[in-house]
Amino acid sequence: MMEKVRQILGVAAIESAWVRRQPLWIFQSLVFVIGLIMTLFAWGGEAALKNLMVAYLVIGGWSIGLNTIGQIIGWGRINLTYEFFVASPVTLPIYFAGVVVGIMPYLLIQVVPAFVIAAILNVNFSMFALLLPLSATSLLIGTFTSLSIILRLKNPTNISAITNPLLTFFTFLPPVYYPLTALPSMIRPIVIAIPTVSLMEVGRWSAGVPIGCDLTLSLTSFASWLILTIALVVKKLKWGLE
Amino acid sequence: MMGYAFATFELGKNYGKAWGLKDATFHVEQGRLAVLVGPNGAGKTTTVKMLVTVLKPSKGRAEVLGMDVVKDCKRIRKRIAYFPQGFMMNLNLTPEGYIKWNLMARGFPLSEAKLKADEWVKLMGLQYCRNRAGWTLSGGERRKVVVATALASDADVIFLDEPTAGLDVESRHVVWRLVRDIVAKGTTILLTTHDMKEAEMIADEVIVINEGKVLIKDAPQNLIKSLSHRYKVAVKKGSFKSGFSSIYSIDLGDRLIIYANDSREVEGLISRLNDPSSIISIDSVGLEDVYLHLIHGG
C-alpha cells in the first residue's frame, strides 16, 4: 500500500512540475475565482453566490478534468512520457491518480472558495458529503469527455485548441452560472442533456438550491455521459500492448 | 548457466498494411549488453517497443525474463526500465528532481530515491547543473538525465533506444562506462544505435536487423573476423594511375574507400597512386564495414 502511495506521489511530483514552475497561472485562476464571487454577489446576491459555490465544486472538477488532466495525458502520449511509464512498475490507475493529485492545487483554488462561501452563507456543511463525491465524478466525466476526443485526433499537436473551446462552450453558454429556471420550461429537458447542466442540477439539489427539471432526468443524463465517455475512452486508451 | 533475459520467436508487427517488423528471432542471455543495429525503418524501435510491452506483437511472440510480453506484461514491467527514442526529460524539473521523482514513481522510498539521484547526477557528470531547471539545459544534458534515470532504476533488464544520439564524445564515453559497469553487475541491456563504433566498443553481442528481419547475431569481434578484408584505404578519387579498378569499394563522391585483404594489398594500392598524398586514411576494418557488407550484400 505504501509503495503505491509513493508511486502516486512520484508521478504527481513529475506531472505537477509545470504548475509549480508557473505560479502566475495559479494567481490568475485565483483572481478569476475571487472576481466571479464579487461580480455574482453584487448582481445576484446570496442566491447567485450559493449557485457559484455549487459550480466551483462541480464544474471546477469537470473543467480540470476536461482541460488539465485531458491535456496532460494527451501530451504524455505525444512526448513519450506515457510510454516511459508503461514500461515501468507504474500502472494506469497509479498514473491517473498521480496526475489527479498533481493538479490538486488547481482544484483547491475552486474548492477552498466554495467552503468559504458556505461559511459566509452559513449553510449546512453536511451537504459537502454529496457535493465532494459529485465533484470527483465531474472530474472523471470531464477527463473522459476530453480524452474521448483527444485520443481520436489524427494530429493531436494542439490539444488546448480543442479543450479550451469545449470548456467555454460547456461552461458559459448553458445554465451553469445562471439557473436552469431562467430558460423556458419546454427546452429544459433538452438542455439537461448537456453534462455540465445535469451535473449542476444534481449539485443544486444537493445544496438545497432550487432546480429547474426533474432530478431523475439529470441523474440519467450524467450517468449516461459517464458510461458513454468511459466506453469511448476504454476503446482508445490502452496502457501498453497497442 | 544463466537463462535468457529476452527472446523473440518469429516476432512481427504490422501497422495497417505495412510491416514494422516481419520476422525476428533472437535471444540474449542475462548479464549481457546486446546492441541492435540496422538502417532507419529496419524495425529496431518496433522490436524494442514489443519487448517493453508498449506494442502488442501481430505475429510470433516475445519473452522477457522467461515471461510472455502479452500474458505477463504486468510482471515484466516491474523488472524493466526503458528509454524511448528521442525522449526528453520534463523541462520543469531539475536533473536531481527528475531522477528522484521517477525513482519514487517506480516505488523507491523518498530517502533512497534522493540518495540514488544524488549518486547518479554525480556519475553522469551533471553536478554543475543538478539544481537547474530542465529548460536551461542543453539537449545532450537532458538526454543524460533520462538515461541516468533508466540506469538508476535497479531494473533487471534495461532497454535504451538510441540513448547516445546527439551526445558529444566525452558524454558518450561516460554513458558507455556506466552502461558497462551496470552490465558487469548482472543487469542485461538492449541498446539501439546507428553508431557502429559504439556497438563495436560496448557490445557483448550485436544483432543486425534489416527490412524487419534479423540478419545476424554475434560478438562484434567475430563479426569483424568474418569479413574477408582486413584493411580499408580512403583516397581522393582520380588519384590512381590508369587501369585500376576494384569491386570492393565505396563511392563517397570525390573520395573512395577501397578494401584490401592484407597489408601487401594495401602496399599494392599505394604503389598505383599518382600521388601518395592523396591517401586520406588507412584503417583496419571494423563493425561499420561488416554492417555495410551485410546490409548491401557485400
Image (cartoon, helix red, strand yellow):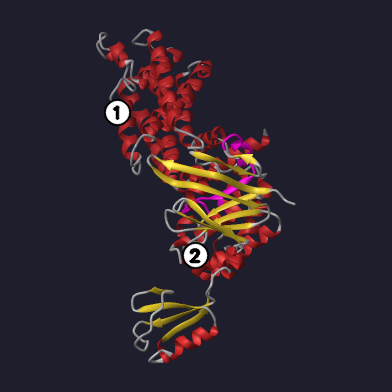
Front residue of B277 and B144: B277
Residue B79 falls inside the magenta stretch: yes
Nearest-to-viewer mark from 1 and 2 = 2
Residue assigned mark 1 = A169
Q: Which x, y percent locates residue A124?
A: 51, 15
Q: Label 2 crowding class (10 Å Cα cut-off): few <14, some 14-19, many 20+? A: many
Image spot of residue B40 (x, y percent): 42, 57
Give the amino acid type for the residue marked by disc 2 in the picture.
Tyr
The residue labelled by disc 2 is B291
Label 1 in the same subunit as label 2: no
Q: Is residue A16 visible?
A: no
CA distance separating discs 1 and 2 = 57 Å
Q: Is B118 situated above or below A163?
A: below
The chain ID associated with circle 2 is: B
Q: Residues within 10 Å of mark 1 (few under 14, many from 20)?
A: few
Which stretch is magenta?
B70-98
Rendered view: A10 above or below A60: below
Residue at disc 2, secondary structure: helix
Magenta residue check for B52: no
